[in-house]
Amino acid sequence: YALVVAYDDGGGASSIIRDVSGSNMIGGVIIASFDEDEELRQTLASTDRPHVIMNRVLPGDSHCIAIDTRAAALTGVRHLVKLGHTRIGHLAGRLGRFNGEMRREGWAEALTEAGLPVDEALIVEAGYDPARVSDAVDRLLAQGVTAIHAATLLTGAAAIARLHALGCQVPGDISLVTMHDDLLARVVYPEVTTVALPTAMMGQVAVKRLLRQIEGGEAETGAVLLAPDALIVRKSAGPPKGA
Amino acid sequence: YALVVAYDDGGGASSIIRDVSGSNMIGGVIIASFDEDEELRQTLASTDRPHVIMNRVLPGDSHCIAIDTRAAALTGVRHLVKLGHTRIGHLAGRLGRFNGEMRREGWAEALTEAGLPVDEALIVEAGYDPARVSDAVDRLLAQGVTAIHAATLLTGAAAIARLHALGCQVPGDISLVTMHDDLLARVVYPEVTTVALPTAMMGQVAVKRLLRQIEGGEAETGAVLLAPDALIVRKSAGPPKGA
């Protein structure tokens, strides 16, 4: 098989999927799109090519593969609870979408199992945009948090930069954990405590499921959620001040 | 045209180029490979497909497109000289290869035009590997540098992390400039002063030159070096201590 890559930076995924699916050269499609659920469902209904949806679960579609980021958030926030934090802010990605909601749920679950209140005022949305992080961090600090759970590595790094700029010691004054692990986590000071995500495996599983459909005989259906990898303890999280 | 992507993580580019070029489905090849010059020349001589080499200049090949990182390094080091630094270390990528040598030349040229000595002891190679940066930074500090010119953004970020870990203020004690600009430059503390590189344009020019060959009539031959974009002054560089 040869790989054909089509890229759209927002809103045009449906027409790409239709074009690609209409070509006789194409055996199947792997979709990594954040189109609205209903739009994506209609697009897929209009084609009959083998497909796999990656990095999200589309309710009602039987070919989805995603990472259990709810579990990743749970692991990260549990680590903060164990260190003694009781007021833990959630620097969210885009709420209302699959990955954003999964992470919020994991954060809330860790608080609930520790008997801590789930205070909506401790959730601030910064999307995936570092430019929005400074304001988000300031709002969390105004709520008296001693630790921040950042839904993405990039916004987590930006949050640490903001804390430095405010003169806050990390982790002396404020701790931070995030999820996902790549080089960025090790070029930030201090190095970032994070939960690794099996992103490469997600790609491999997506390709395998697609090939099984193309080559006949799709045994496996239904959404698959890959468990996160281990918590990687580095330097960005410690006990709360005075603990 | 459809895009076919083949990836090799070291040493296998020649066989990929041969395989791809032997297929009747392939109109042309864009090569972004760091194979040795002589090996790449032999591979290309054994195929007759239209091709463009991107991100390096292969001497003797008439279809190369790269960025003038010599000029980018010159611009960055000039900025440090203008701030008053006279002992400026070069945190090099891989010396002996096209991009590494271009950057070293730009560093040396800026020193020479300012009447400063070009001291080989101020060059330390860390490749493109953050894990090697701590040792490299320590060696530059032992040479008494007051500023570091980092050949890559990722190693520049890692150098700043090492300086923090050593208790050095950036830029109060040690300044740093690098080249290339992406989100990473703005999630490091302090934000990184850098020279932007026209990487997207390099890709566009590569595709245009390839299409011109495929569609007949290659007017343009010879290596093209794209000028870097502007210096972006952020917070990681200031006057030397006591200046």
Image (spheres, coloured by chain):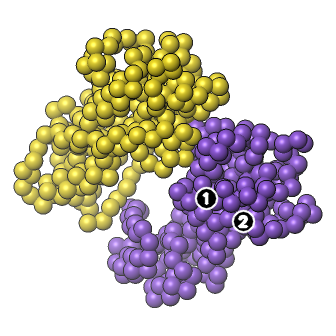
Chain colours: A yellow, B purple
- Disc 2 is placed on an element classified as strand
Q: Which residue sits at x=22%, y=52%?
A: A205
Looking at the image, is B56 positioned above or below residue A106? below
Is residue B201 among what the camera can see? Answer: no
Q: Quadrant of the N terminus of chain A?
A: bottom left
Taking depth in this image into account, of B37 and A120 the one nearest to the observer is A120
Between circles 1 and 2, the one closer to the viewer is: 1
Of marks 1 and 2, which one's residue comes earlier in the chain? 2
Q: In screen coordinates, is A167 left or right of A104? A: right
Residue projecting furthest to the right: B115
Q: Which mark is residue B135?
A: 1
What distance separates the C-alpha of mark 1 from that of mark 2?
13 Å
Q: Is residue B140 above or below residue A195?
A: below
Q: Which residue is mark 2?
A: B123
For residue A221, above or below residue B91: above
Identify the amino acid type marked 2: Ile
